[in-house]
Amino acid sequence: MSADARVNNEPGFVLHTYPFKETSVVAEVFTRDHGRVALIARGARRPTSTLRGLMQPFTPLLLSWFGKSELRTLHAAEWQGGLLAPQGRALMCGFYLNELLLRLLARGDAHETLYDRYVATLEQLAGEAGRSDYERATYLERILRRFEKNLLSEIGYGATFDVDADSGAPVQAQVRYVFQPERGALQASGQPGCPVSGQTLIDLATDRFERPATLVEAKALMRTLINHTLGAKPLYTRQLLRELTELTQ
Amino acid sequence: MQPAALENLITALRVLPGVGPKSAARMAYHLLQRDRRGAEALAGALNHALTHLHHCRLCNNFSEAEVCEVCASPNRDKRQLAVVEMPADFNMMEATQSYGGLYFVLMGRLSPLDGMGPREIHLDRLISRALDGVVEEVVLATNFTPEGEATAHTIGELLKARGLKVSRLARGVPVGGELEYVDSGTLAQAVRDRRTV
């Protein structure tokens, strides 16, 4: 076995697990230096396995594995500590992040910046407790929008928000635009695309999400961009949240 | 080339979780060669279960009658309703002999990334079950995995909004646990969930 086939104590998170054979699981993990990796955790579903409680999403781990095929073999996982799991509504947002990473990242591409951003985002999600309902909702929205924007630019689908794609001039705060995923911001004159105000585009470019109208428009715009990148298959987490909203009414 | 009947049997056995073509073939040969009576009993039991087992109207667990034994029992405290994920969890709760209320078995958990949503775990049925006017407290006994926590949170919010008392199983250091040997994740949660004495 060559030296590069063995990886030791790599910081990472489980994104999702699938049962595999009688007692094992396949874990899709997101690691700092190796990106998304599929690991088989042998025996992780046995009642006495120490891996059993560890191979869960939102748990900071140090992972060691070997192998060169698409499916690597996990040989050790250790709880890294220091991070509390998100709860309640924030936990749902955590699943959404994981689904985005699963769907949008290719296996084996390292994204150190995105990994650090993911850890910071999980920390922020876990820190939402103790806020009022409205505060919490907008707090979570801001966290998600920042993460979506970073994710898209990290995987090469970053958009320029504050430049008029027709004229190359800076976007004007008072003007209405439509945003087309392929081209960018265009002054609105009946063409298709996601309608958005100039102010929202400027806020998005500068990472400012304090204005309520910005949050609403940014959500629709990021959704358009993500759907464009994902293709036809919808996101499960989004569908689940929609069904839950129906039950609440 | 194998006879079609054997081929069919092997294919049929592969519906079992964790059974691939090799295991299925091994099972088929064993049943046909070594244990024909066992095979007959298996076929009979499968058929019987398929025609006679349904979900209990009240708790959603498997039952031969419309309402299962536990739900029909007069000795049960009808004011408490424990929500568990699977029948195995129900059995475990019963084995503790510490809970005297009724149950609702979700037959799954909310798992967004597996496409398990509110419909798949019968949340609408749980809501109408919990709102029968007799239930006063709902005990959330789903797993302490992220999926189980998400399920508990969701059910909790839905039922609290409808005026029910909702509680969640406590979590922390196991009985007989020594801090030195407890896994750090559990200990961290126990610190977070500590209670005033």
Image (cartoon, coloured by chain):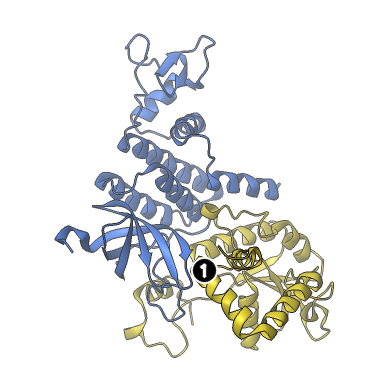
What amino acid type is highlighted by mark number 1?
Gly
Q: Which of A33 and A116 is in front in this view?
A: A33
Identify the residue at horizontal 34%, vertical 38% (top origin). A150
Q: Which chain carries label 1?
A: B
Q: Nearer the viewer, residue A32 or B8?
A: B8
Q: Which of A192 and B23 is in front in this view?
A: B23
The furthest residue to the bottom? B176
Q: How crowded is mark 1: few (under 14 residues within 10 Å), some or many (20 or more)?
A: some
Residue A60: which quarter of the image?
A: bottom left
Residue A9: which quarter of the image?
A: bottom left
B120 lies left or right of B170: right
Identify the residue at horizontal 34%, vertical 17% (top origin). A163
Residue A207: which quarter of the image?
A: top left
For numbered disc 1, what is the local secondary structure? loop
> Against B162, is A99 above or below?
above
Q: Which chain is blue?
A: A
Q: Where is residue B14 in the image (x, y as percent from the top left)?
A: 58, 66
Q: Where is residue A73 in the image (x, y as percent from the top left)?
A: 31, 65
Q: Is residue A21 visible?
A: yes
Q: Where is residue B24 in the image (x, y as percent from the top left)?
A: 55, 70
The furthest residue to the left? A3
B115 lies left or right of A100: right
The furthest residue to the front? B1
**Label total for image:** 1
- Which quarter of the rendered picture does the N terminus of chain A lie within? bottom left
B71 lies left or right of A84: right
Q: Which chain is yellow?
A: B
> Against A182, is A90 above or below?
below
In the picture of the structure, the residue carrying the numbered disc 1 is B18
Q: Which of B175 and B161 is in front in this view?
A: B175
> Against B99, is B186 above or below?
above
